[in-house]
Amino acid sequence: MKIEPRMRGFICLTAHPDGAAQSVKNQIEYVKSKGAIANGPQKVLVIGASTGFGLASRITAAFGNNAATIGVFFEKAPTEGKTASPGWYNSAAFEKEAHAAGLYAKSINGDAFSKEIKQQTIDLIKADLGQVDLIVYSLASPVRQHPETGVLHRSVLKPIGDAYHNKTVDFHTGKVSEVSIQPAGEGDIENTVAVMGGEDWAMWMEALNSAGVLAEGVTTVAYSYIGPSLTEPVYRKGTIGRAKDHLEATAFEIADSLKEINGRAYVSVNKALVTQASSAIPVIPLYISLLYKIMKEKGIHEGTIEQIDRLYRERLYTGNAVPVDDRGRIRIDDWEMRDDVQAEVATLWEKATTDNLSELGDLEGYRKDFYNLFGFDIAGVDYNADANEMVAIESI
Ligand code: NAD
Ligand code: NA
């Protein structure tokens, strides 16, 4: 069938398998163009492997170092006449390319927060790989059912203490308006920390470690975000920021627990990018559209694949000590956070209105990235042709 984007609010209900496949190929080509990663990871588990930073992490390991990869994710399979979720098509395309290149790649589709999926992953590692030497934790989810209590926690993006008022943009229409976000209520902080904090990462590492499937010298990394003072009340000093504080603190606990096997645990602070999650946060799309404009002008714009490629080559696998900030965090948001970049974004922020945003900001780039997430608007894909939505993932 012919597949077109169908929008509902900030989400797209359809995904294009050929577009997703082309996008995965483009990422693979990027990593290959950079050559082999010296001393890179060999047996890799990526939790949250189907989209965004996690997909880029899987691709970089596989095509930068011929790594065997196991990817865990939670995606919708296609049904006759109804497309799969984007991460399903991405993973199908990734496995196809990896297998064609002679690389081991298997995937597990299910709730990574559950004990069952952890056990299934451990069984697969034992059966096929023996051990893993890199675990990337890249989950982004609005909900988590706690494996011990059964409680369903929901994360929220709210300021703490006072309401937050600022500008925002509807990136579909380009309309700039004022938005007010009411402060977190009872339980919001705890729930957000339960979903997006470090508890589940620690549970994964504990389960993997006690099963004996972590290699000597193992590395684990999870992803965080800081961002500018502009978004601080709603991001880093809001409910999600509390979760990121918790995630960052968890890295130290995990590092301690891995001492016997000389393991290391890091949080990497990554750049703001268009993802399904970030487009739903008020204020962030306006920030990203201004940020993209400035970073593209300066020739320092990156997407997820460029970010993760740089994380592996220039941070994690240099053969030297990993460079970290004063809180032990890896910073690949270094270009986003440069003083000149932030000063120019702040100036544009003051000026931005509905009338001038298409010139001041990179709304077009924002929209393109958004459609690209779903496999649309990708060069070289014939969107008028019939597409087959019933794509299988080879290992599933
Ligand atoms: P994403 O939505 O693109 O990816 C989320 C992944 O998690 C997908 O593979 C999805 O299938 C998987 N997932 C979600 N719930 C799951 C579940 N219950 N079980 C198994 N898999 C599940 O998100 P992203 O933007 O790549 O975010 C990944 C991490 O990077 C997050 O910690 C996020 O905070 C962080 N980060 C994002 C940005 C940004 O701007 N997007 C910037 C810095 C850091
Ligand atoms: Na991800």
Image (tube, rainbow, N blue to C red):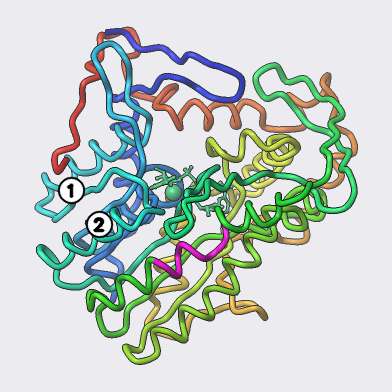
Residue 388 drawn at (x, y percent): 22, 16
User: Is residue 38 among what the camera can see?
Assistant: no
**Label 1 sits on residue:** 98
Quadrant of the frame with the N terminus: top left
Q: Image point 24% across, 13% down: which residue? A: 80
The majority secondary structure of the magenta stretch comes to helix
Residue 320 part of the magenta-drawn span:
no
Q: Image point 60% across, 74% down: which residue? A: 249
Residue 137 drawn at (x, y percent): 42, 60
Which SS class for mark 1?
Answer: helix
**Label 2 sits on residue:** 62
Residue type at mark 2: give it: Ala
Dots 2 and 1: beta carbons under 8 Å? yes
Q: Compared to 274, does 7 lie above or below?
A: above
Highlighted range, magenta = 196-203
Residue type at mark 1: give it: Ala
Q: Image point 89% across, 34% down: which residue? A: 351
Q: Image point 41% across, 12% down: which residue? A: 4
Residue 240 drawn at (x, y percent): 67, 53
Quadrant of the frame with the C terminus: top left
User: Is residue 354 among what the camera can see?
Assistant: yes
Which SS class for mark 2?
Answer: helix
> Between marks 2 and 1, how big is the CA–CA gap?
7 Å
Of the two numbered discs 2 and 1 on the same chain, state the one appearing first in sequence: 2
Asked if the beta carbon under badge 1 is closer than 8 A to the nearest atom of ligand 1, the reply is no
Residue 197 part of the magenta-drawn span:
yes
Say which mark, if any, is on residue 171: none
Q: Is residue 264 left or right of residue 168?
A: left
Looking at the picture, tell me which residue is in the foreground, 320 or 232.
Answer: 232
Q: Compared to 179, does 150 lie above or below?
A: below
